[in-house]
């Protein structure tokens, strides 16, 4: 059976810019949390899904994907969670046999499954691909299997920016505003909720 690209949901950040009453990934959006919506959208693609998170969200993640697909950073007596580069490397290591990896920040619950699949399909012909809305670069960003070794060497806060800069990155045009909408502040949450209710009303009506 041919291997598929995996979706790596990146949810191990501290969320320090968000000043709400709880961690931003725990904030409700409709009947589920921000984290849950993001993971559920990834699962809906039918692609393998890995969730990289912290002990605070390990149980919630394990209720959505197999426990072996939950990578917990900063647990027990181990090191504290590192930067985005560490999270990416951990997620890639957990699905080392995948045909590529799509990096999806856990605070982007509006990215649609079809968008994820479009970027995954682009990895058949490109080493790096990313979702783009009307000329604006968004998420997810996908990396082909040929970049495994370089992804595994990532660490710190820089993430994969240098890989995106080094290799020709292919834009995948989508009509999905969710690719640009992350959640760093309380204003971002209010905007997300407004869009969520608007979409729910359209679906119901």
Image (cartoon, rainbow, N blue to C red):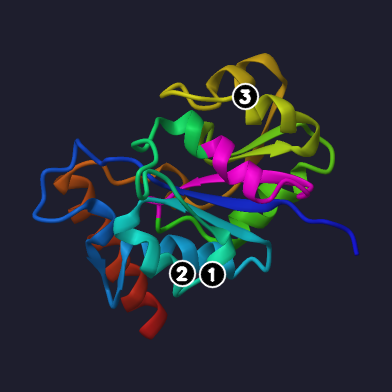
Q: Is residue 197 visible?
A: yes
Q: Which residues are magenta?
A: 88-108
Q: Secondary structure at mark 1?
A: loop
Residue 101 in percent (x, y) is at: 66, 44
Q: Quadrant of the N terminus?
A: bottom right
- Residue at image position (78%, 49%) is 97
In this picture, is 14 found above or below 37?
A: above
Which residue is the extreme one toward the bottom? 204
Residue 157 in percent (x, y) is at: 41, 24
Q: Is residue 205 visible?
A: no
Q: Nearer the viewer, residue 202 or 67?
A: 67
Q: Are marks 1 and 3 in contact (CB under 8 Å)?
A: no
Q: Earlier in the sequence, mark 2 or mark 3?
A: 2
Q: Residues within 10 Å of mark 2 (few under 14, many from 20)?
A: some
**Label 2 belongs to which residue?**
62
**Label 1 belongs to which residue?**
65
Residue 66 in percent (x, y) is at: 57, 70
**Quadrant of residue 200 in the image?**
bottom left
Q: Are marks 1 and 2 in contact (CB under 8 Å)?
A: yes
């Amino acid at each position: 059976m041919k291997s598929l690209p995996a979706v790596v949901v990146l949810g191990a950040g501290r969320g320090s810019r968000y000043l709400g009453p709880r961690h931003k990934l725990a904030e409700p959006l409709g009947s589920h949390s921000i984290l849950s919506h993001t993971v559920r959208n990834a699962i809906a693609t039918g692609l393998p899904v890995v969730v990289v998170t912290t002990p605070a969200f390990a149980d919630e993640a394990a209720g959505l994907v197999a426990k072996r697909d939950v990578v917990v950073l900063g647990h027990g007596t181990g090191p504290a969670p590192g930067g985005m580069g560490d999270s990416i490397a951990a997620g890639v290591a957990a699905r080392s046999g995948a045909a590529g990896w799509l990096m999806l920040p856990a605070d982007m619950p509006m990215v649609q499954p079809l968008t994820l699949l479009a970027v995954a399909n682009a990895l058949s012909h490109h080493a790096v691909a990313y979702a783009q809305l009307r000329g604006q670069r968004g998420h997810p960003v996908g990396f082909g299997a040929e970049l495994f070794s370089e992804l595994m060497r990532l660490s710190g806060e820089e993430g994969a920016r240098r890989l995106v800069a080094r290799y020709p990155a292919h834009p995948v045009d989508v009509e999905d505003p969710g690719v640009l909408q992350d959640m760093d502040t309380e204003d971002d949450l209010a905007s997300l909720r407004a869009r969520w209710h608007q979409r729910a009303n359209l679906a119901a009506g």
